[in-house]
Amino acid sequence: MSVAAETPVSDKAVLRVDNLESYYGPIQAIRGVSLEVREGQIVTVLGANGAGKTTLLKTISGVMNPEKGTVVLEGDEIQGHEADTIVNRRMVHVPEGREIFPLLTVAENIAMGAYTRRDRNFIQEDIELVYSYFPILKQRATQAAGTLSGGQQQMLAIGRGLMARPRIMLLDEPSLGLSPLLTEEIFAIIKRLNEEQNVTMMLVEQNAAVALEVANYGYVMELGRIVMADTAETLANSKDVQEFYLGISDEESQRGQRRWKQRKTWR
């Protein structure tokens, strides 16, 4: 995957989560999670099914209310706020499974992303920006969104999210159900949006290899807790991450080291 020069990362935390706890009824899904996402970063959260990754994103974005802890967006606590209020603060959540409106056209879905905006004069300009990143969506603008392929629906979900002009975008399993080729295409666009539009990203992903290729920093979750946190390069070279998330044996780890050296030349 060829990418452009890396976006400068500042010391300013766009998002900070402290001691977050969330429940589904009597079941505790998030157990004292603390993390931060700095301006300009792509931060990935890795973990197996059931680790609490999706619940974490839902709690941060206001879809769920935490039982305990704080979510701080650009210096202000937002835990317990309604999801539309959080969108107005320019945090956008692209959910697992895309959740597009299948009976609406592609163009109507994109326009829905600007539903909470007041600066109506700039909406058409942003629609054209979305089409510049996803030309296939412009070609299919009048087509019902439910008839798109899985990859095109993922592009549509991200494009709809862009219409809110996000400062930070939460992406839940963007590679879910996609072929390796489409996964590479989607992640290349994610990287471009980070670099060209200065969109900070928090990325939940089971495909650890591709997530760590584009990320600056990563967290590993198990059973609702953060069990590991480090730079993406360090995680990619960790024997535990290689064995449990990348499927890499000890014999293959040296090739992984060479891949990371090559990655620096891509930038």
Image (cartoon, grey):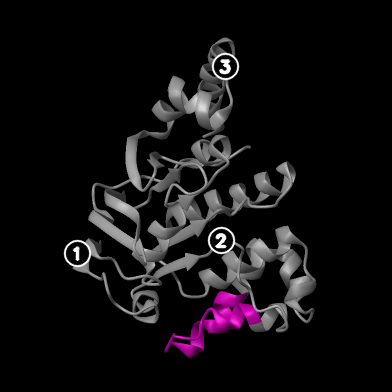
Residue located 55% across and 20% down the image: 256
Kindly identify which residue carries mark 3: 249
Task: Residue 232: give x, y in percent of width and height.
Answer: 42, 34
Amino acid bearing label 2: Glu
The residues tagged by marks 1 and 2 sit, at their Cα atoms, a distance apart of: 27 Å
Sequence order check, earlier mark of 1 and 2 = 1
Location of the N terminus (image quadrant): top right
Q: Residue at x 48, y 50 (%)?
A: 204
Per the image, the residue denoted by label 2 is 96
> In the rendered structure, which disc, 3 or 1, sits on the residue that comes first in sequence?
1
Horizontally, residue 71 falls left or right of residue 254, namely left
The quarter holding residue 237 reads top left
Secondary structure at numbered mark 3: loop
Q: Is residue 198 visible?
A: no
- N-terminal of the two: label 2 or label 3? 2
- Residue with the mark numbered 1: 75
Q: Is residue 57 left or right of residue 189?
A: left
Which segment did they paint magenta? 109-127
Cα–Cα span, label 3 and label 1: 43 Å
Q: Residue at x 39, y 26 (%)?
A: 234
* Badge 1 element: loop
Q: Nearer the viewer, residue 231 or 30?
A: 30
Query: Residue at left 60%, top 71%?
Result: 99
In the rendering, at what x and y percent does residue 41 appear? 38, 48
Mark 2 vs mark 3, CA separation in Å: 30 Å
Q: Quadrant of residue 158?
A: bottom right
